[in-house]
Image (tube, rainbow, N blue to C red):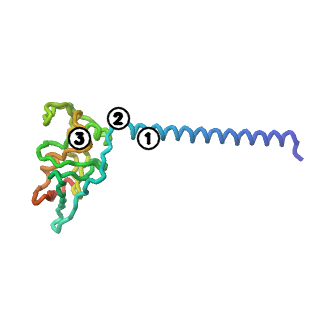
């Protein structure tokens, strides 16, 4: 028969260990909760980050043609502009078609949301005048089923909002036609796919 004092000591020791494990588990859950709350606040309430509003933004109509080329059709909005959903580095964004822009032009807040690296500082000539920007290389840019890799862009510190100008650094790589409020892009080069 076991000594009652040793048995009581063993039970107390077990209770203390069980209590210690509960404390450690509760402390871990508490720390994880604080971490998730902090990450959410940083992500959702960071004033330097803009998350694009993609509600009511059209998805381009994408087709693969018999010759293997890809065709995307976008309908102009009521203001005759082409605004549509695409992606940069597989993250959905809102594009504004602009043949007057030499490069894809990204507002600073959207660039922060996308986690883009700012390259060399440059001066940008815009409708508002001269402003500061940075070069950027986009791993991929996708419109409909057309996906191009390593596309040049600029990040504009003075450009606000959530529209990204889809400029000539993308557009010169596709064939473009416009007719009756329809913009069509066609891509036939398979090297950059």
Residue appearing at x 68%, y 38% in the figure:
20
Residue in front for this viewpoint, 6 or 186: 186
Q: Is residue 177 above or below residue 126?
A: below
Residue occupied by mark 1: 40
Residue 83 percent location from the top left of the image:
21, 51
Residue appearing at x 30%, y 47% in the figure:
53
Q: Are marks 2 and 1 in contact (CB under 8 Å)?
A: no
Quarter of the image where the C terminus is located: bottom left
Res 119 → quadrant: top left
Residue occupied by mark 3: 106
Q: How many marks?
A: 3
Q: What element does badge 3 sit on?
A: strand
What is the C-alpha distance between the residues marked 2 and 3? Answer: 16 Å
Q: Residue furthest front?
A: 78
Q: What element does badge 2 sit on?
A: loop
Residue occupied by mark 2: 47
Res 16 → quadrant: top right
Does 123 sit left or right of 3 as displayed? left
Res 64 → quadrant: bottom left
Q: Are marks 3 and 1 in contact (CB under 8 Å)?
A: no
């Amino acid at each position: 028969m076991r000594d009652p004092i040793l048995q009581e000591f063993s039970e107390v020791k077990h209770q203390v260990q069980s209590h210690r494990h509960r404390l450690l588990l509760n402390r871990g859950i508490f720390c994880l909760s604080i971490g998730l709350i902090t990450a959410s606040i940083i992500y959702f309430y960071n004033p330097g980050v803009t998350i694009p509003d993609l509600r009511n933004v059209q998805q381009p109509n994408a087709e693969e043609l018999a010759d293997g080329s890809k065709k995307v059709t976008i309908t102009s909005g009521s203001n005759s502009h082409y605004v549509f959903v695409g992606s940069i580095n597989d993250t959905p964004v809102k594009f504004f078609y602009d043949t007057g822009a030499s490069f894809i032009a990204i507002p600073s807040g959207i660039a922060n949301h996308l986690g883009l690296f700012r390259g060399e500082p440059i001066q940008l000539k815009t409708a508002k005048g001269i402003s500061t920007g940075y070069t950027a290389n986009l791993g991929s840019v996708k419109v409909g089923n057309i996906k191009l890799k390593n596309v040049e862009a600029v990040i504009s510190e003075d450009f606000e909002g959530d529209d990204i100008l889809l400029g000539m650094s993308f557009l010169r790589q596709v064939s473009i036609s416009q007719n009756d409020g329809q913009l069509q892009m066609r891509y036939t080069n398979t090297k950059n796919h």
